Each structure stands twice: as structure tokens, then as C-alpha cells.
Amino acid sequence: MEFFRQETVITKLEAAYQVAQQERRAASVALSEAEHRQAKDRQALENLGPLPPLPELRQQLSEVEKNLKQLDEQLAAIEARLREMAATVIRDARIVGATLSRLVLLEELYRGTFDTVIIDEASMVPLPNLWFAGSRAHKRVVVTGDFRQLPPIATARDAEKYPLAARWLQTDIFVKAGIVEGRARLDDPRLCALKVQYRMHEAIGEVANMLVYEHDGNPLEHRADPQNYAHATAALPESGEPLVLCTTSGANPWCGRLDPGFSRYNIYSAIVCIRLAARALASGAQNVGDRSSPNPYKL
């Protein structure tokens, strides 16, 4: 029994010795690296030459700090002048355009008042931003936008968990005003419905009608000139067709998500779009003149 105990002790001692050897080798490598870095630092100091005396270094530091202070004062004066110019321009301008983000950041804007405030793309505007922008008007607020387009973007999507986010960040002004309750109330006296479009080819516009606008009984009326799309529709793919639908469902087009963030991407669909655009350009779509770049309306 004593023999087995001695064997166990020896085994443990051997294991401890092996661990100590490994630690010794690691320490030796670390020491070698430290000596190498020290030699490089010493060589760098030698390349700099002799350093000035300490009083001289302190004098140089004092001069640099003095110059920095003067530059800070000049910068502050320039910024004050820019704010004064911005205030003058805004005060004298008949029309001022700004993003909602800029409105809440620029003092000359958020402290001013205007006869009329026009808020565009209102379907995407969170209510707090819209209320604040509207408060800058002392005569009239005009809200424009398509309530069938994108709603405000908010990452807190669980209404039960984040009720305030659902109430203030995910609800647009059209819903809040009672204009949209499932089906839009087109007879609302506050609503001026715009239905004539001059941008899309009629075939594309009819897809928007079928999926969206006929639901409200307010289909788009198409006034676009077909000649504006003649060169584009003559190009590949499917020459002569203004609307071409390509399905990639059989190719397993997996979708990824950026991290950090919430934006999705699809590599396969991106490659297909690039190849289709290349075919369109190669077949003559570049002859459209100033409108040479393929886009969703002319590809």
C-alpha cells in the first residue's frame, strides 16, 4: 500500500515538473520578445539623436499650448460667424428646406417659426418628429405623402412589450388622424388625393394599382409618355416588354443579415440584377441619353 502511495506522489511530482518546464519555456519566450522590443526602442531613441534639455522641452510645450489656444479662439469665432450667417439666411429666406433631423439639431431652425410648414414623405415620419415640425408653423401645416408606402422605421416591434414605441414610433399621421382605418377614407375633407402619375410606364403602374391603390378605390391614372421608355423597353431582357418578372425561387437564394444591424442582403439576387443590367446596357439601353442608367422603371 505504501508503494502505491509513493508511486502516486512521484506521478504528481512529474506532472508538476512538466507544467513548470512549460511555464519556464513560455517565460523565456516572453523575455526574449521583451528584450527584442527594448532593443528596437533603444535604436529608435538613438536615431532621434540627443534630446533637448528639459527646460527647453517645457518651453516648446508652452508655445504649442499657446498656439492651440489661439486656434481654438479662431475656430470659435468662425463658428459664431457661421451661426450668424445661417440665422440671417434663414430669417431672410422665403423658402427653407431641411431634414427633420437637421430641424432638431440646428438652433436657427428649431427656435424659428414659419408661416407654413410642409412635411413630405409623411408616412415614414415618427409622430414626435412630425408634431415638433408642425409646431414651428404659426399659420398652416401641410402634410404630404402616400399612406400605402413605408411606415416609420422602429426596431421595437413588440407592441405588448413596447407600447410607447408602438404608439409613437410605429404609427404614422394618416392612421393617427383616422384617415386610414384598414381602408382609406378618401372622402375625408382634410385629404387631397393625388392620382395622376407621369413617372412609371403604364404596365408598371397597373401592378401598383392591382396590389395597392384599387384597394382604396383610388387607382392611379397614367399620363407618362410611352416614347420616354421606347429605348429602354427595346433592350434585353425580353425586348419589347415594359415589365419583366424574374423568379429566383428555384435557386435557393438564401438571405443574410448585416451584423450589427437589421438590413438584409441577398447575394444571388444582387448578381442576377447586375447581369440583367449588363445585358440591357450591351443591347442598347445606354442610348437613352441622360437616362442611361437602368433603374426599376426602365430596365
Image: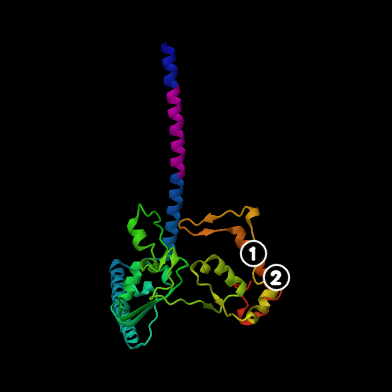
From the image, tell me which residue sits under label 2.
236
Q: Determine whether the residue tagged by mark 2 lies in a helix, strand or loop.
A: loop
Which of the 4 image quadrants contains residue 192? Answer: bottom left
Asked which quadrant contains residue 221, the reply is bottom right
Choose top left, top right, bottom left or bottom right for residue 278: bottom right
The question of residue 129 being in magenta is answered with no
Q: Which residues are magenta?
A: 11-29
Please report the residue visible at 42 percent of the width from the left and 63 percent of the height from the top: 153
Q: Name which residue type carries label 2.
A: Leu
| Colour convention of the picture | rainbow
Pick whichever of labels 1 and 2 is earlier in the sequence.
2
Query: Residue 189 location, x and y as percent?
Result: 38, 76
Position of the N terminus, as image quadrant, is top left
- Do labels 1 and 2 touch, CB within 8 Å? no
- Disc 1 marks which amino acid? Leu
Q: Secondary structure at mark 1?
A: loop
Which residue is the site of mark 1? Answer: 245
Which secondary structure type mostly characterizes the magenta part of the structure? helix
